[in-house]
Amino acid sequence: MTKPTTPSRSFASDNNAGVHPRILQALADANRGHVIAYGDDAYTRAAVEKFREHLGSNVEVYFVFGGTGANVLAIKAVSQAYNAVMCAETAHINVDECGAPEKFTGCKLLTVATKDGKITSDQLKPFLHGVGFEHHVQPRVISISQSTEMGTVYTPREIRKLADFAHRHQMLLHMDGARIANAAVSLKLELRAITADAGVDILSFGGAKNGMMYGEAVVFFDPTLAQQFKYIRKQGAQLASKMRFISAQFLALLSDNLWQENAAHANRMAQVLAKELARIPQIKITQKVQANGVFAILPKRFIAQLQKKYFFYVWNEETSEVRFMTSFDTTEDDIRAFVGLVKKVVN
């Protein structure tokens, strides 16, 4: 059998990266003997306690396979089909989840335009005009991404303002934290400061983009919101039988600062990449580089040629805006090689 060639690193997504060696070792260590399935095991209990160390002693934590499942089930747990979820038009739940939130929750997504991926309570006020009116969907959840799909980061103050707005109007704040580690490191804060302490009600906590093989967590900061979640997770096809292999990964990720190390490295590589690209006259950086994403205008005629060697996404076809993502295993050599090719192609 022909072995596949080792692919070069790309800048398309942190999902494309491999698995951190310490995560792989945790998986190997968990692969010994038999344990009870479906989460009734020591690895899962230890991982839940590790989450409580970081996020608060009262949180309820449920592990799932992926980010879309985490987002969908988190919203499903606190909504009815007549409700609405408010989010940025760039939000992952709106753009990249194939309609799963609408299909499985029945909720309508109400989106607002945003240049930097962040939303404010002032943008959401118009959606409240139909509250109590039976002909309109009823707003129930505000969903934000941290960091955003545009690579920007909400401050604790910005999150708190949205949380207070939500709670004043009998709504809840959900955070899609697929890259929450990158956001926390960017802000030089602990995870709790941008979640529990800022008023977040439910968190989809990402692992796959920060060095794990797979697995995400749904975290409820108010345990009463999670009372029926074990049934929702099972019915939503997100209950892992061999859950220890998700739990062991989170246990490793949240121990000995690995989550911070991985995210800090990815963020630093994004800064290096942005600095080098900004020196090329034909390229314009379009967003603040606050996490591990770099957005730039790249002349359309050069894109296909560059993609032959380095895969990356075109974010906006009309404006020729592209997205470059760095990860825990991106190296400065990777960046030098890529930037060297860009200079060669555009000049």
Image: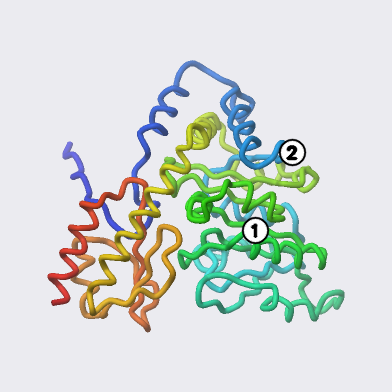
Is 6 drawn above or below residue 1 in the view shown? Answer: below
Return the residue at label 1.
104
- For image coordinates 52% across by 51% down, the residue present is 188
- Nearest to the eye among marks 1 and 2: give it: 2
Q: How is this picture coloured?
A: rainbow
Q: Position of residue 1 (x, y in %)?
A: 17, 36
The answer to which quarter of the image holds residue 325 is: bottom left
Q: Position of residue 207 (x, y in %)?
A: 49, 44
For label 2, the crowd category at 10 Å Cα-Cα, with few meaning under 14, some 14 to 19 and many 20 or more, is few
In terms of depth relative to the viewer, which is nearer, 106 or 87? Answer: 87
Mark 1 touching mark 2, by CB under 8 A?
no
Q: Which disc, if any, is residue 317? A: none
- For image coordinates 53% across by 51% down, the residue present is 184
In the displayed structure image, the side of residue 243 where residue 151 appears, left or right: left
Looking at this view, name the residue that lies furthest to the bottom.
318
Is 109 drawn above or below residue 221 in the view shown? Answer: below
Return the residue at label 2.
58
- Element class at badge 1: helix
Q: Position of residue 216 (x, y in %)?
A: 54, 45
Q: CA distance from mark 1 to mark 2?
A: 28 Å
For label 1, the crowd category at 10 Å Cα-Cα, with few meaning under 14, some 14 to 19 and many 20 or more, is some
Is 244 drawn above or below residue 15 in the view shown? Answer: above
Identify which amino acid the numbered label 1 is placed on.
Answer: Phe
Looking at this view, name the residue that lies furthest to the front.
188
- Element class at badge 2: loop
- Earlier sequence position, callout 1 versus callout 2: 2
